[in-house]
Amino acid sequence: MLAQLKSTALLGLSVYLVEIEVDAASGMPAWDIVGLPDTAVKESKERVRTAIKNAGYAFPPRRVVVNLAPAYLRKEGPSFDLAIAIAILAATEQLHCNNLEQYLFLGELGLDGSLRPVKGVLPISLEYCHTDYTLLVPAANGEESAIGGTITYGFHQLREVVYFLENPQSLQPITAQSPDFSQLTPAQSLHDFVQIKGQSEAKRALEIAAAGNHNILMVGSPGSGKTMLSQALPGILPPLSFAECLSLSKIYSIAGLLPPNQPLILERPFRAPHHSASTASIIGGGRIPHPGEVSLSHHGVLFLDEFPEYRREVLEALRQPLEDGQVTVSRVQAQITFPCRFLLAASMNPCPCGYYNDPHRQCTCTPSQLQKYRSKISGPLLDRFDLQLEVVPVTFQELHREQPEEDSATIRRRVLAARQIQALRFANSDTIHNGAMTPRQIQQFCQLDKKSNQFLEQAFQKLGLSARAHNRILKVSRTIADLAGSETIQLAHLAEAIQYRTLDKKMWMG
């Protein structure tokens, strides 16, 4: 007998239907899975066979053929286990249900017939929330699926699914309460700015970076506070909006990184991969591409400590995502695009020994060592940092100063005020902050008076700036003006923005 039902699969962020066809015909006992399955799908044969027996049903002593359509798309992962098992039970008349076509089945089976959670349920539920489909998923995925909006039922055992299909009135769908986004708190950070002594210039630069989502590079001697400053950055970022939360949570659902019993990511991410990370782990990839660190940092912070220690090909691969806000991974089977609108915070020493230009320690690096170290960061990549600053070591007096430092909550209030100005400014566009302004928006919102324009021209010539650096200076100037509550960009705002572009000439060109 032939049985047909539906499941789903993911290709990047795209969701597509998979039709499960099972034919249980007479003949020598055997069974095959066709339809371009990967290893995990092929291995489901033993999981499904054993789960059916341990759930109290009979596995047919027949020739069983399972087809996963469409056959031209590779099927990945164990999420088809439940669908295959239900189809086998229907094909062998151990399950009597006349409306299997209205359900979408997702779930991995344990050998005892239990249902285990799978990845990517949230984007699937969001995709089919306005259709007549009903999702049947493991209980652990129930709330995640219900958040997406599709009618959802959650189960712990295969036996429970069979009973529900034969008695659909026996169970109520899962209802999930959406969080109150007006009450969300900012991301938790490892440090509060009140704990960081001195470093007023670096704190100001981080405030500007948070207010406009500008990339920032900090260069300084070991122990000057670069890492601690970066780890305090999430604490001054605004909370996620509803749209940002859903966009980010879809990525984490696909990656299988949603925390247990938490169907949504409610805080801006702070990702800090080790400098030994591969290009695929940072950008995304694999035989069937999965999101990398740049996408896991979407709407949050990607912190790269010891910046020059990353492999050059990894750093150069960041250039396109930083510019476009998305990354496209191409493979023979498909071309997949993941969003990655993140704030890049990087820190590095000025030289291999770490003490170039240090006021208290002597640098021991030779000119060739210095050149080799700095050449690891190309000019085009350096050009994509809106803010570049030198972090000087903290003095003894600053460490023991009794006057309290400004805390993160105070800085965050100014950042929120600047972000609200930007939200009104870009209300009729897809742009959400100054750092993502298009050239047309720069021309519209970053007008300079005659005196400021002349000053920018002098800086452009003296510093040898590129057109990209010119536009990024205007973006930073606009953010500084927003922090000051100014409708127009003043000369002081422009001058402060320009000073954050002098490090590349000072450090890299002598």
Image (tube, rainbow, N blue to C red):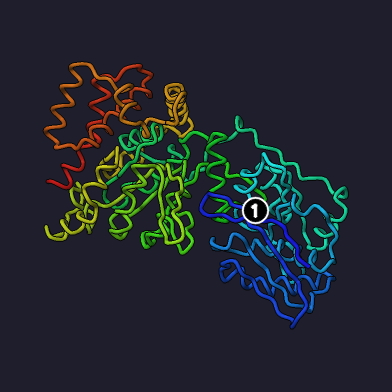
The residue lying toward the viewer, choosing from 301 and 153, is 153
Q: Position of residue 1 (x, y in %)?
A: 79, 68
Rendered residue at 66%/47% (across/down): 144
The residue lying toward the viewer, choosing from 241 and 196, is 241
Q: With 300 as the anchor, is 226 left or right in this view?
A: left
Q: Position of residue 147 (x, y in %)?
A: 67, 42
**Outermost residue, bottom direction?**
28
- In the depicted structure, whether residue 489 falls above or below residue 143: above
- In the depicted structure, whether residue 273 falls above or below residue 148: below
- In the depicted structure, whether residue 425 falls above or below residue 273: above
Residue at which label 1 appears? 260
Q: Position of residue 171 (x, y in %)?
A: 84, 49
Disc 1 crowd rating (10 Å Cα; few below 14, some 14-19, many 20+) is few
Q: How many marks?
A: 1
Rendered residue at 16%/24% (across/down): 455
Q: Amino acid at mark 1?
A: Pro
Residue 354 visible somewhere in the drawing = yes
- In the depicted structure, whether residue 462 falls above or below residue 134: above
Looking at the rendered structure, the secondary structure element under dot 1 is loop
Rendered residue at 12%/32% (across/down): 461
Q: Position of residue 113 (x, y in %)?
A: 77, 67
The residue lying toward the viewer, choosing from 241 and 113, is 113
Residue 476 visible somewhere in the drawing = no
Rendered residue at 60%/56% (across/down): 9
Q: With 445 as the anchor, is 173 left or right in this view?
A: right
